[in-house]
Image (spheres, rainbow, N blue to C red):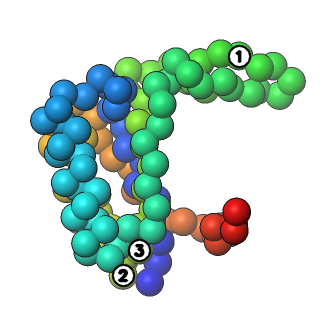
């Protein structure tokens, strides 16, 4: 099966979610785990904690200034893009109408490193 990265965009940081929004996000994550599709997932800290590099220049803040920022990322296994889109469509960020998701095929990677 192919792997797909789902980039989750939102106008709110995860730290600003209401308890109901946190619960909805957790239910979605649990559903992905239960389906066997989830490879890995991470919520990201606020965009104002980002540090960006452009050549030799280091700046505080995200790479671009945007209303919506990447709030998290997950990687899923799916038989095809349509199946990956169906998994992504269930993400609360899509349902809330203030953000959305972007789905991209994973081109390659390395397995998790032993610690």
The image quadrant of residue 87 is bottom left
Q: Earlier in the sequence, mark 2 or mark 1?
A: 1
Q: Position of residue 39 (x, y in %)?
A: 45, 68
Can you say whether 36 is above or below 100 in the image?
Answer: below
Q: CA distance from mark 2 to mark 1?
A: 40 Å
Q: Which residue is mark 2?
A: 79
Q: Is residue 104 left or right of residue 19?
A: right
Q: Looking at the rendering, in which quadrant would you find the N terminus?
A: bottom left
Can you say whether 31 is above or below 67 in the image?
Answer: below
Report the residue at 69% width, 68% height from top.
Answer: 114
Q: Residue 40: which numbered mark, if any?
A: none
Q: Which residue is mark 1?
A: 59
Q: Position of residue 20 (x, y in %)?
A: 13, 35
Q: Position of residue 111 (x, y in %)?
A: 64, 71
Q: CA distance from mark 3 to mark 2?
A: 7 Å
Report the residue at 17% width, 32% height from top.
Answer: 19
Q: Is residue 30 left or right of residue 111?
A: left
* Residue in front for this viewpoint, 61 or 21: 21
Can you say whether 92 is above or below 4 in the image?
Answer: above
Under circle 2, the secondary element is loop
* Residue in front for this viewpoint, 48 or 81: 48
Q: Earlier in the sequence, mark 3 or mark 1?
A: 1
Under circle 1, the secondary element is strand
Q: Is residue 72 left or right of residue 84?
A: right
Cβ atoms under marks 3 and 2 closer than 8 Å: no
Around disc 2, counting alpha carbons within 10 Å, would you say few (fewer than 14), some (14 to 19), or many (20 or more)?
Answer: few
The image quadrant of residue 62 is top right
* Residue in front for this viewpoint, 54 or 60: 60
| Residue 103 can be seen in this image | yes
Q: Which residue is mark 3?
A: 77
């Amino acid at each position: 099966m192919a792997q797909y990265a789902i980039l989750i965009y939102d106008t709110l940081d995860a730290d600003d979610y209401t308890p109901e929004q946190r619960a909805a996000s957790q239910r979605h994550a649990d559903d992905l785990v239960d389906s066997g599709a989830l490879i890995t997932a991470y919520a990201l800290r606020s965009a104002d904690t980002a540090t960006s590099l452009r050549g030799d220049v280091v700046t505080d803040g995200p790479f671009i200034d945007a209303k919506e920022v990447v709030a998290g990322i997950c990687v899923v296994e799916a038989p095809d893009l349509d199946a990956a889109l169906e998994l992504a469509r269930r993400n609360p960020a899509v349902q809330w109408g203030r953000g959305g998701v972007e789905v991209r095929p994973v081109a390659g990677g390395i397995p998790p490193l032993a610690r």
